[in-house]
Image (cartoon, grey):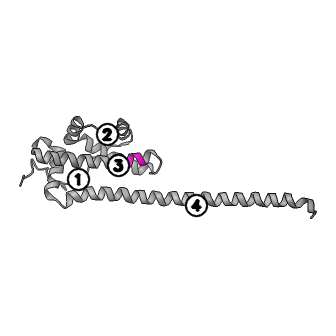
Amino acid sequence: MKQSHWPRVIGIGTNLAVVAGLVFVGLEVRNGRAAAQAQIADGIADGFIQHNMAVVQDAEMGCIWRVGLHNPDALTLDQAARFSMYFRALFNQYIRVHHLYSTNFLEDDFWRSVANQAAWAMATPGGRLFFERNSGLTQRFLDAVAADAETYAGPNWGMGRPIPEACDPT
């Protein structure tokens, strides 16, 4: 090989090394994104678990939640305040999930599942009353739920039992 070809060979080798480095960086970014998405999914699950545990660990709160969704007028003033705060905290979680979905950090199926749950809660008598009397949820979120939710019968919390008319305030 002529000595005059060495700069060209070195230039080609350098370019190949740069391309290989970019491919490596691209793979690392993709792996990092997958790891970030897994952490985000864990964080979302933790948030919903905390909400569920509030109902599981406190029988009165469980009753307030069930009655508040289906017969909100039967709640006492204190129970209605607890229901409203719990509902707002839950919907803040839904909004968080929607934000992550709208910034492409969550898959369509994951968002659709959450949108179904949100749409169901919003359609209950207590959900409708909550939204009539409260603000703070963006129209963009409400539109997204309406657009992405499918028919969802809702959870069978009572395992077939009727929802109680009221909660014992004691």
| Residue in view at x 14 percent, y 50 percent | 163
Reading the image, the residue beneath label 2 is 137
- The label nearer to you, 3 versus 4, is 4
8 and 148: which is toward the camera: 8
Residue at which label 4 appears: 28
Residue marked by disc 1: 156
Report helix, strand or loop for mark 3: helix
Tell me how far mark 3 sits from mark 4, CA to CA.
30 Å
Query: Could you tell me the amino acid type at mark 4?
Result: Glu
N-term-proximal mark, 3 vs 2: 3
Magenta residues span: 96-100
Q: Are marks 1 and 4 in contact (CB under 8 Å)?
A: no
Disc with the residue nearer the chain's start (2 vs 1) = 2
- Which residue, given by chain and number where applicable, does mark 3 sit on? 114
> In the image, what residue type sits under mark 3?
Val
Number of residues whose C-alpha sits closer than 10 Å to that of mark 1, classed few (under 14), some (14–19) or many (20 or more): few
Q: Is residue 97 magenta?
A: yes
Determine whether label 2 and label 4 are within 8 Å by CB.
Answer: no
